[in-house]
Image (cartoon, rainbow, N blue to C red):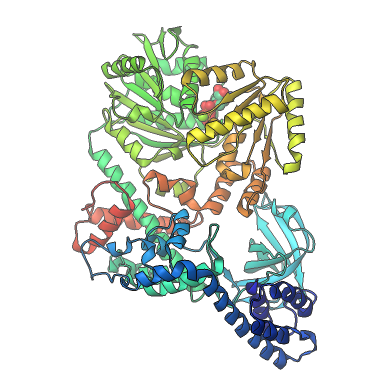
Amino acid sequence: MNAEALRKVLDLERQRGYVDSAVFGGLDKFLHNWSDQAMASLATPSLLSRFRSLFGVSYASMDAEQRRQWAHDVLSFLDKMEVEDDSKKDSPVAAPVSSIRKKSPPKMKTPSAPAGDKGLDVPITVVRGISTALSGKFGKLGVKTVRDLLYFFPHRHLDYSQLKFISQLSEGEEQTIVANVWQAQEVILGGRRGTEAIVGDETGNIRVVWFNQPYLAKKLLTNTRIMLSGRVSLFKGRHVFQSPEWEIIEGQDLVHTARLVPVYSLTQGLRPRQVRKLMKEFIDRWASQVTDFLPTYLRRRLNLLELPVAISQAHYPDDGATKDKARIRLAFDELFLLQLGVMSKKRQWQESKPGSSFDVNKPVLSTFLESLPFTLTQSQDRVLGEIMADLAQSRPMSRLLQGEVGSGKTVVATAALLVTAANGYQGALMAPTEILAEQHFATICQLLSRIGEEEGEGNLRSYKGFLERPMNVALLIGDIKQAGKRKLQQQIMTGDIDIAIGTHALVQKGVDFHKLGLAVVDEQHRFGVEQRSSLREKGFSPHMLVMTATPIPRTLALTLYGDLDLSVIDELPPGRQTVKTKWLRPNQRESAYAFVRKQIAEGRQAFILCPLIEESEAIVAQAAVVEYERLSQEVFPDLRLGLLHGRLSAAEKDAAMERFRSGELDILVSTPVIEVGIDIPNATVMLVESADRFGLSQLHQFRGRVGRGTEQSYCMLLAENPSEVGRERLDIIENVQDGFQLAEEDLKLRGPGEFFGTRQSGLPDLRMAKISDVALLELARNEAINLFQEDPGLARAEHQPLAQELTRVWTGAGEWS
Ligand code: ADP
Ligand code: MG
């Protein structure tokens, strides 16, 4: 029974003074529908008769006082029913567990125990109301310990405390309205695409604008009921809602109680109302036991909330202002800890051995640049200059190279590797997957063969004519034959190999360089911090270039990769086209296939990306095989299809890629291994299955696989049953081409932590920090720099809790005290 919906309606009525305006068309109609449904779920005759007497009324014919009294009665009735309801549902599981739990009440933390508040790292089953079954469900959300649960913040709050009519809106404050959309359209706002809408309630109309969200226009159909929450400003003498939070109100599910109500991201089997209740009790009881690790002087100076207060206010805030303060405190923690950790790593690294300074004026550089079939873009040129300046120093380079897919990072990296080899040092290039490593190998070999005579084949090539000696390039990936691998490793160790290309395998045990001068890491966000540091420890404090196709706003990049300097290629080579992107509904699958067929008839090629399954690689590969068979037997029996997945041997993958590249195959069916870097100019169609399951940046990467030649290219996205967030992503990717903007949208949807995969990478989590927290980012950065200067080892007594917290969040990231 949906008691929540009725509660919301009654609450709105109360706020508006019982004028029967809470639902469109009057309350009676709503009550009629609602009670029909509710009646069915009533168990006992006594409840049933009480229900009949309560709901057999006409709200419209009562006066305000009668309505108030009636609403009160209904609310207490609902409470009573829910109590019965809940006890029915929970008792079978909860009873035995809670009786055990009584014997072990939650442990009180021993004051200022040197180990910090370890008492929080206990399973959540110690919490009253959490049964083993329930804890399993929380486990799915990554919530295992009491500490996890304390930090399991709602992803937002519904602010129903400020519900206003349009005529009551005033400038500046955060306010909420419920209104009807009259019209919405895409517009240009400040040079960028956005949405403008006119909405109204019974007291008037107001203009609403959203910057950068043109896709909204299509969502907000005329007569949609929406809730808008945000600030109102004055424009040319009239009120305007600027980029408010919005929510389409579906059915009768109108509003909630008059407070800030947390909304948690839940999984199946967790009911929002149940979790809200549980969290309230839990927070009231446990939040006070958290130790504040920030030094008091710092917390006071920055005017931050105490940690226990911040945690409880982040869940159940007293009001909007306190909620903001709570978030600021928690976001500060995240950024501050991140920054301290990153700086400490930088120090560790720079204080180890000095690097090698190169002569960057070797003739081979200009020979190489002149041999290219194109001229470098201005951005490439500038970035190459920045890299060369670093390589000339003995302080090891530590640089992040950011650039859209296809912006030409690989060429720049190749130039740097050449200079390294010309200086008698070795270079390493690492990619996130074997296929990409192979492709880098192929690309680099092809570039080098323009300036030198090529010898050898397979995994080892040699080039003559531009250095005093032949230059050797090797591909080292996981599954080449054991004997061959050992031989290559040997040659890397003796210095025979100048440039080694591979995957993570390159930084793992068994590969020692003779004289590693430069390490290039492609696609940073797949590489953990740990791998970065282990690479640095190989060889001779090599110069380090990290390449990423994920555009990261500058301030965030400085914080996340505070140990790296930043270079950006911010233009694409001339003549690149935009890829037409379309989100297809399930019933359009046939026309998608027809479109693929048509393109192939015109001589083009297509990628079909198999559904993402979050299980083992073996299962993903298996699913790809099945899909491949279905497509080649049932859908495209007359076309030539190939299959690519992570379980194939290097030779098999090579063969498939090569056949596709040479045009022997029309369609390449693939798992997401194809995500980054693959470069096939004749491929014009990318069809993505289960597109809703991928993140925006990932989808953008997939899309970047096509549109690399001169023909118009297309990206088609299929999604069977997308969730709300999934739909939102598809909407965005369909309408936004710019990678930078996509990254920002992605960050908004996922938050920086998930976006960068910090959870897997050994970096501390970012949950509360937002992309827009520029000032806070800078504050945290500056405070970290100050603290680090004053007490680099965090040795002072007042910094002990902080040192412990650092150790805890930077799992395995080294010593702090
Ligand atoms: P990224 O690694 O940034 O995705 P690549 O280095 O793989 O990009 O380059 C993508 C494609 O663009 C390659 O085919 C490359 O040869 C080509 N390319 C690179 N720089 C230029 C340029 N300045 N002008 C024209 N084409 C370029
Ligand atoms: Mg690339």
- The location of residue 747, given as percent across then percent down, is 53, 50
- The location of residue 525, given as percent across then percent down, is 45, 40
Return the residue nearer the eye: 77 or 721: 77
Q: Is residue 136 left or right of residue 65?
A: left
Q: Is residue 299 above or below residue 140?
A: below
Q: Is residue 546 visible?
A: yes
Q: Is residue 222 above or below residue 763?
A: below
Position of the N terminus by quadrant: bottom right
Name the quadrant where ligand 1 sits.
top right
Residue lying at 34% horizontally and 55% vertically, measured from the top left:
337
Return the residue nearer the eye: 67 or 662: 67
Q: Is residue 325 left or right of residue 392?
A: right
Q: Quadrant of residue 208?
A: bottom right
- The location of residue 593, given as percent across then percent down, is 73, 31
Return the residue nearer the eye: 489 or 744: 489
Q: Is residue 119 above or below residue 568?
A: below
Q: Is residue 613 left or right of residue 812?
A: right
- The location of residue 167, given as percent across then percent down, is 72, 77
